Image: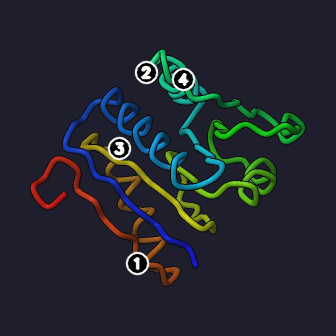
Amino acid sequence: MTQVNFYILPQHDSNSREAFIYLLVNKALTQAGRILIIAADATQSKRLSQQLWCNQPERFIAHEIIQQADDIQPPYPAVWLMSGFDQAIYTRLASNSEVIIDLSHDGVTLASKKILLVTNQDPEILANSRMKYQAYVDSGITPAVHKIGQTSD
């Protein structure tokens, strides 16, 4: 069964969101296997790559940016990054990923064991997250919502 978690951050900026994603990746690596991060675009993918390499220099997270399905070759890294949603790449990587972090800007609902979505207060990102939340509800999945930075978390 698919478990979907939405993390809602109080900030508006992308730096805070990407720093939180780094924390999620760190946590997921200790609890699960491979992670697939679907970035919104190539720019975000590069920023996330930088975050994974440099956030804690003594503990970088090895990963690979996948730009086409033919790039997927063993040995597989613990973390894959893809820019935007590409069905061919997703199909190859999703079956080998325990956790998917979806930052894409489309309304595609994903099927996997665990899906994480991170939103902040940027109006465009918030609207996209609401669309995705509703799409999951419409497909029969009730996502868990975690409001980060509030006393209930």
Q: Residue at position x 66%, y 31% from top? A: 63
Mark 4 vs 2: CB contact within 8 A: yes
Residue 119 screen position, x and y as percent: 34, 48
Alpha carbons under labels 4 and 1: distance apart: 34 Å
Residue at the bottom extreme of this rendering: 140
Q: Are marks 4 and 3 in contact (CB under 8 Å)?
A: no
Q: Is residue 48 visible?
A: yes
| Position of residue 23 measured from the top left corner of the image (x, y, whole percent) | 40, 39
Mark closest to the chain's N terminus, 2 or 3:
2
Q: Label 1 vs label 3: CA separation?
A: 22 Å
Check if mark 2's residue and mark 3's residue have beta carbons within 8 Å.
no
Q: Amino acid at mark 3?
A: Glu
In the image, 142 versus 106, the foreground residue is 142
Q: Nearer the viewer, mark 2 or mark 1?
A: 2
- In this rendering, the answer to whether 69 lies above or below 145 is above
Residue highlighted by disc 4: 60
Residue matched to label 2: 55
Contact? badges 1 and 3 (CB < 8 Å): no
* Residue 142, label in figure: 1
Tag 3 residue: 124
